[in-house]
């Protein structure tokens, strides 16, 4: 079976879309599948990850913003028009037909998908903002929608199968492994984990470090995770050294670090499901518009702690960290509740849907 992914990553887009596609692709490899990633925007570390597990990478031509004419608010992420991107993708496929074409891109919709119909037996879309129509056979949205109507009912073709909710969260296999191995927490804070995504364009990581380092008489250790492309990498590494915090750059031990922590501070987005699967109570901030609904719904379900952002993010983090520090009952509630709703087996369920 041949599966092609169309996904991008950059300092603006972030790395979350790529990582969830990579997770799905890695699991599909176990099904004797040939996989190709097609990207117009990418980061060097992405190509290394693909090559290490034998996935083919095909870059599209450089972006040409003069061709953008789409009204979609995320159109600029594509760097060209949907029709031109579709033509470039067809060229990258050498005109051959794939069994599955999987798209994870806010700038692509039914216009692009319909153009690729002759080149794919089936099309799958990974989305989480439900703001445009799709021409696909399978749609995955791993966000939590408690008590809400299916937001895609009028956005997909009638025969489309919709997978909705964190039951289908695309988490790497190690999250399931550490979930089984994780020691029971005592809901006291011994170890803090800070992670605001692989890029963190606006450097919320430094604000979190500033907030935590201002706390006197610290009895906890701190782990800080950043991507290799973080715009303030050197500064963060230096600051962590100054405070004796551990800084992990482009780590492959995310699940292990989450399992060892007692509280997290980080962004919304797909990282929420990683922390929930391992029961890590996290002070969570939506750092992009597309993360706001997800963060609000997850907080309402008791899966995360998402305070309103005051005038100072540093002060907001410090205040709410101390509130949780003295509230083991709330930490326990969030931890247990999040693990009930995210079991870490989502990628297996999605692969079963694709293979069937």
Image: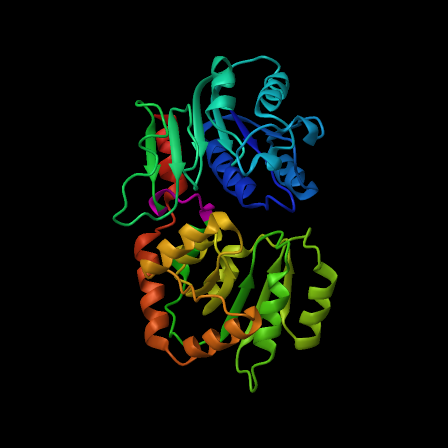
Question: Quick check: is 61 in the magenta stretch?
Answer: no
- Whether 168 is among the magenta residues is yes
Q: How far from the left and from the top, in percent, is residue 107?
A: 54, 33
Q: In which quarter of the image is residue 195?
A: bottom right
Q: Which residue is rendered at x = 36% and y = 47% of the image?
A: 166
Please state which of residues 244 and 104 is positioned toward the viewer in this rendering.
Answer: 104
As drawn, 307 above or below 72? below
Tell me where the magenta segment starts and ends, as one range: 166-173
Where is residue 104 shown, x and y percent of the image?
50, 35
- Residue 187 in view, yes or no: yes
Left or right side of 78 for 272: left
* Closest to the observer, 186 or 167: 167
Residue drawn at the location 63% of the way across and 52% of the way down: 199
Q: Answer with the quarter of the image where residue 75 lies.
A: top right
**Which residue is at a point 44% across and 43% down the rendered structure image?**
170
The image quadrant where one finds the C terminus is top left
Q: Position of residue 18 (x, y in %)?
A: 56, 40
């Amino acid at each position: 079976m041949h599966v092609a992914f169309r996904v991008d990553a950059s300092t603006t887009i972030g790395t979350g879309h790529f990582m969830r596609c990579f997770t799905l692709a890695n699991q599909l490899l176990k099904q004797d599948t040939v996989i190709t990633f097609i990207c117009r925007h990418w980061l060097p570390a992405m190509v290394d990850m693909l090559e290490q597990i034998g996935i083919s990478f095909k870059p599209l031509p450089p972006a040409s913003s003069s061709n953008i004419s789409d009204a979609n608010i995320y159109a600029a992420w594509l760097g060209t028009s949907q029709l031109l991107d579709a033509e470039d993708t067809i060229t990258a496929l050498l005109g051959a037909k794939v069994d599955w074409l999987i798209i994870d891109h806010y700038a692509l919709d039914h216009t692009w998908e319909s153009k690729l119909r002759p080149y794919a037996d089936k099309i799958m879309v990974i989305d989480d903002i439900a703001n445009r129509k799709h021409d696909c056979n399978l749609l995955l949205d791993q966000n939590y929608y408690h008590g809400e109507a299916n937001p895609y009912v009028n956005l997909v073709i009638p025969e489309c199968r919709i997978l909705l909710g964190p039951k289908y969260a695309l988490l790497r296999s190690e999250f399931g492994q550490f979930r089984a191995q994780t020691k029971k927490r005592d809901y006291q804070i011994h170890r803090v984990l800070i992670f605001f995504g692989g890029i963190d364009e606006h450097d919320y990581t430094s604000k979190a470090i500033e907030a935590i380092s201002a706390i006197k008489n610290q009895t906890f250790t701190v782990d800080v995770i950043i991507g290799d492309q973080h715009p303030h990498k050197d500064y963060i590494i230096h600051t962590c050294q100054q405070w004796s915090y551990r800084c992990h750059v482009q780590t492959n031990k995310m699940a292990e670090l989450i399992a060892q922590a007692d509280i997290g501070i980080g962004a919304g987005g797909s990282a929420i499901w990683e922390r929930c699967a391992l029961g890590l109570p996290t002070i969570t901030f939506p750092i992009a518009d597309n993360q706001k609904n997800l963060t609000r719904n997850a907080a309402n379900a008791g899966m995360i702690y998402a305070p309103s952002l005051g005038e100072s993010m540093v002060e907001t983090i410090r205040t709410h960290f101390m509130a949780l520090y003295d509230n083991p009952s709330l930490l326990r509630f969030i931890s247990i509740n999040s693990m009930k709703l995210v079991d870490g087996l989502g990628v297996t369920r999605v692969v079963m849907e694709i293979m069937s």
